[in-house]
Every structure is written in C-alpha cells, then in structure tokens.
Amino acid sequence: MKKIIFGVFVIALILSSFKPRPSVASIDSPLNIVTEKKVFDRANAIKNFVEKTPNYNTDITFLIDMKIMSGKNRFFIYNLKTNSIIDQGLVAHGLGSETGTMGQLKFSNTPNSYCTSLGKYAIGKSYFGEFGKAYKLFGLEPTNNNAFQRNIVLHKYDKMPCDEQTSPICQSLGCPMVNEAFYKRIEKFIDNSKSKIILEIYY
C-alpha cells in the first residue's frame, strides 16, 4: 500500500512540474526546439511582468529573436492566454548592429549608434512620419531606455521582403522594421488594444 501511495505521489509531482510548450500549429514555418523554447520562456517572463502591471496588455505580446538570421521569420505575435504563436514575419535589425561576422550581432542603447537595443518596450501611440504610420517605442530597461530619444519606432518599409529567404535582408537605423503586409496584421492588434502591448527584443 505504501508503494502505491508513493507511486501516486511521484506521478503527481511530475505532472505538477509539467509546463505546456507553445503551440505553433497556426504559423507557416516550423520552429526548431531551441527557438521554440526561447519564445516560450520569454513569453512566460512577459506574462509575469504584465500581470503585475495593469497598464499593459495581458493577452498579446510581440517577441523578436535577434539570434535568428534576418532572412528568416523572427518577429512573433504571441497569445499569452493560449500559449501560442499566432503569427510571424521578417524584421530588420539596425545597421550598426552588424559585426562583419555572419550570425553575430552587437547591440547598443547609445544615440547615433544605429544599433538595435535589447529589452522590453511599451508600444506607444501611432504617428505619421517618413515611413507613413509608425508607433513610438518606449524602452523599459537600462539597455533600451534611450529609445524615445533615439527615435526608435516600429515601422514598415516598402523594400522589405515578405517571404523568408536564405540571405540576410535590408537593415534599419536601429528600428524594428517590417514589410507592409506584416505591418497591416501587427497594427490591427495595436490599434484594437485598450492597453499598451509589450514588445521584447532578445538575443
């Protein structure tokens, strides 16, 4: 009887420690296990962050994995309620982040560096500028708190490709820059949100 009780306890312990992996059934390009785990881990951290802060959207977050080559989808729209990636697309990094070595990027929060900055951002109000409608970004960490001063915004660019490719894509001046088709899908989430959506760029 003691063995049976012990066995039930062990099974219960295993089940309680199990965490569901994010669903990727709704996206076009399958992710490798490492990338999928990073997305899930970052989403979990953001979920904990927004649950403690009522100013932020608790349903949706945007995640950008800069470790992925720029010719591949690395901007993920993630549903925090269903633990699933619901869309993905290409996104450019800053030209200052190039190191001359394929697969290696550098990051900076310094004005005029033209680098991408890592960290969490709050997506602010839209405005119309050089690239049409764009969204102001407010850095929430020491690694990106100069974003507003640097004019780092989420914007589209008509020369950005829509489809994945084997070679790197064009670069920005430090902004997360996407193609027009993906931008239309992104802006629906932002414009329909009653609270600010968190965007995180990580490496």
Image (cartoon, rainbow, N blue to C red):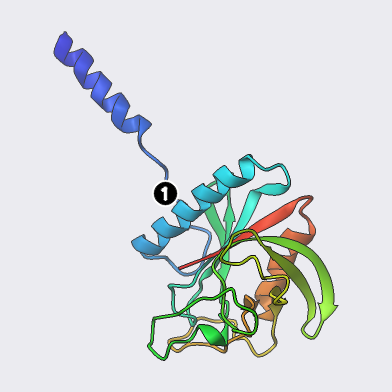
**Eyeballing the image, is 137 above or below 167?**
above
**Eyeballing the image, is 92 above or below 57?**
below
87 or 197: nearer the viewer: 197
67 vs 85, left or right, is: left
Q: Position of residue 71 (x, y in %)?
A: 49, 82
Residue 182: quadrant of the picture? bottom right
Q: Residues within 10 Å of mark 1 (few under 14, many from 20)?
A: some
**Eyeballing the image, is 197 above or below 157?**
above
31 vs 112, left or right, is: left
Q: Which residue is mark 1?
A: 21
Quarter of the image with the C terminus in it: bottom left
118 or 128: nearer the viewer: 118
- Give amino acid for label 1: Arg
Residue 48: quadrant of the picture? top right
Q: Is residue 76 visible?
A: no
Q: Position of residue 86 (x, y in %)?
A: 57, 58
**Eyeballing the image, is 74 above or below 36?**
below
